[in-house]
Image: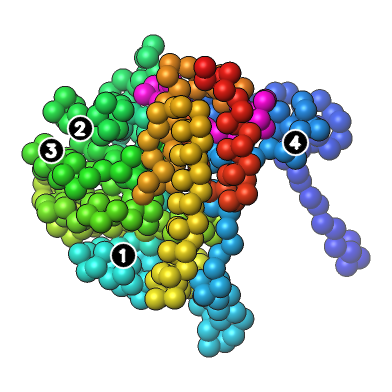
Amino acid sequence: MGGECRVGVVVLGLVGSVTGLSTPTMRLRVERNANFGKLQGGYLFPEIGRRRRAFAEAQPELAERVISLGIGDTTQPIPPNILEGLVSGASKLGTSDGYSGYGAEQGNAELRSRIAERVYGGRVGAEEVFVSDGAKCDISRLQLMFGSAVTSAVQDPSYPVYVDTSVMMGQTGEVGPAGQFEKLVYMPCKPENEFFPELSETPRADVIYFCSPNNPTGAVATKAQLESLVERARADGSIVVFDAAYAPFIRTPGVPKSIFEIEGARECAIEVNSFSKYAGFTGVRLGWTVVPDTLEYADGSKVRDDFNRVMTTAFNGASNVVQSGGMACLTDEGMEEIDALIDYYLGNAQILRGLADDLGLRHCGGIDSPYVFLDLDGRSSWDTFSAILEEAQVVTIPGAGFGPGGEGFLRLSAFASRASCEEARARISKLTHLFA
């Protein structure tokens, strides 16, 4: 060899694409998770994006006119004091003294304490707060904890994540002719019951997913309604997963922002929440889940301990930089900035309520909520979505995408800019022929 070193490289699986040689087709022997085959089409919001792109490709001259009142994505910049928290957190990583690696999987201790005090007024302890990368992610982690044997209940219409994660986890049977999954309990929420389920007519479920302010209907549960929910859960020995992601929009005195304002909730409820709508963190990603130490399974074991195991096993902790921003949110200055942001979006919601009045349509939401839910009086929600996109170049969300109970409704989001909301109202209000 004369001291010559030769290095050989073997590439597996790419020969056909690199050399142009034909290779026999290989088929994996790994079976697909059959539960994914039960899911109906694509997830709602990517499907809306696909239809928007298809419209832009078909009519490129109108693409720049498109206004989105669709996905609940914030549009206003992160305010200065909160932004400084993020900047400061990032800057520390460039110094020897400030650098930090892995943090606690449950979250920064100071942030957990601030959430317990500033958000919950001490109704929960810091050790019961688990900081994460968002409420949506935590719903999936809760499903991982609950497993496939539980029976889940969802509002109908409902935020799609509750249903789809239940399906993925194997809690359901096949989807029936009415678009509802077997073994999943649907709680009809209709205008005649103020979009709150008739609990006396609801079969028992192990886990009840409940959202207030509600996505998509914009309905906000009263204290009396939440008391009845807690009472039912305690009577049935069920767990309520309470989604409070839109809680900062509640301004009406006496309307609960947390399930833990209700007596007895600590023995039957978990709450998920997020900074996404608090402070425009939809792309920054920071949320939390509260699992009370007093919440126990039938065998007496603590639910908190199992969720802690999920978080330490399947999660590596929220970004240290982002948690610095979260701590800035929960200062006096940060809370003032959040209030200003919420005021802005609630002003947009008033404009969209005005649009509903322009069209003579019954509607829910827009008060204590960023969503306005239009009653189309029997018209198809997908057809109406398409017509508004074609004729007004405005993206909305068809209610049918939130489950069978959403058919015949349209959701409008107040998270666009003020100018966009005003322009969208002006355009859609001219489409009276669609609602005549």
Q: Nearer the viewer, mark 3 or mark 4?
A: 4
Assign a secondary structure to mark 3.
Answer: helix
Q: Is residue 261 above or below residue 12?
A: below
Q: Say few, some or many: other residues with alpha carbon within 10 Å of mark 3 (under 14 / 14 to 19 / 20 or more).
A: some
The residue that appears at 75% across and 44% down in the rendered structure is: 11
Q: Is residue 90 above or below residue 420?
A: below
Badge number at residue 119: 1
Q: Nearer the viewer, mark 1 or mark 4?
A: 4
Mark identifier at residue 191: none
**x, y (%) of residue 303?**
21, 52
Any mark on residue 63, and which? 4
- Pointers 3 and 4 in contact (C-beta within 8 Å): no
The mark that comes first in sequence, 1 or 4, is 4
User: Which amino acid type corresponds to the residue marked 1 in the rendered image?
Assistant: Val
| Magenta stretch holds residue 400 | yes
Q: Does residue 190 appear in the picture of this structure?
A: yes
Q: Residue 235 vs residue 408: left or right?
A: left
Q: Which residue does the image show at 61% across and 37% down from the upper left? A: 426
- Tell me which numbered mark, 3 or 4, is placed earlier along the sequence: 4
| View extreme (right): residue | 2
| Residues marked 1 and 2 touching at CB (< 8 Å) | no
- Residue with the most extreme top position: 177
Q: At which x and y percent is residue 399?
A: 45, 28
Label of residue 205 in the image = 2
